[in-house]
Image (tube, rainbow, N blue to C red):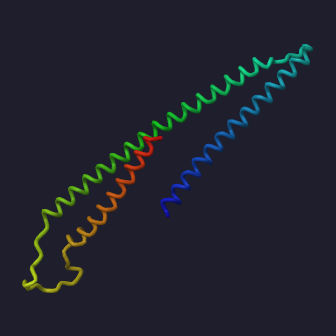
Amino acid sequence: LQKDILSLQTEKEFVKSAYENALAKFLELENRITDSQTKVCSLQDEFGIGTVIEDHEARTLMADTALKSCEDALSKLQKEQEKSMEEVKEEYQKIKEAHERLEALKKLHKLDDRPEPGPGAEHESKPESESKPEEGLTLASTSCGDAFVNLEQEKGENIIAYRER
């Protein structure tokens, strides 16, 4: 549930940022249009000229502008994709290194394992504070290993899903 909350908050911040950037661009374009229209009206009044843009020319101008806007958006998205892919590669490398360290710890732990005394062997009962540290390490290693495997699988699924986009 916390992962979902974090994911939604991240998405919200991204959408908010995109909205604010788009709004700023919109206002900038609106101001440029208003300024240009004011200049045109001023020049037309000064010289007594009335010009009308033909429909074909207007459509061409609008299509060129829309095409340029789409190209800019595509370029921006490609840069974001490249950045995301680099981040995915870095995270994958971190996971791979952590997995290797975990495996090394597991191997080291297995080398240090001593056989427990059998049912017939006599042994004294030790308080918990004197118990072997390896026992806690085994439980921690197992749960960490399981958690790591789950994280690695989840990350792998995210990489595959990202590549499919």
**Place of residue 132 in the rendered image (x, y in percent of width and height, measured from the top left):** 19, 74
Residue drawn at the location 65% of the way across and 44% of the way down: 19
Q: Is residue 147 above or below residue 81?
A: below
Position of 101 with respect to 77 (left or right) is left
Q: Is residue 88 above or below residue 49?
A: below
Q: Residue furthest left?
A: 121
Position of 32 with respect to 137 (left or right) is right
Residue drawn at the location 68% of the way across and 24% of the way down: 63
What is the total number of numbered labels drawn onto the structure image?
A: 0
Q: Is residue 135 above or below residue 69?
A: below
In this orientation, which residue lies closer to the viewer: 66 or 37?
Answer: 66
Q: Is residue 41 above or below residue 11?
A: above
**Place of residue 92 in the rendered image (x, y in percent of width and height, measured from the top left):** 35, 47
Residue drawn at the location 63% of the way across and 25% of the way down: 68
Position of 110 with respect to 73 (left or right) is left
In this orientation, which residue lies closer to the viewer: 65 or 131?
Answer: 65
**Place of residue 18 in the rendered image (x, y in percent of width and height, measured from the top left):** 61, 43
Position of 138 with respect to 17 (left or right) is left
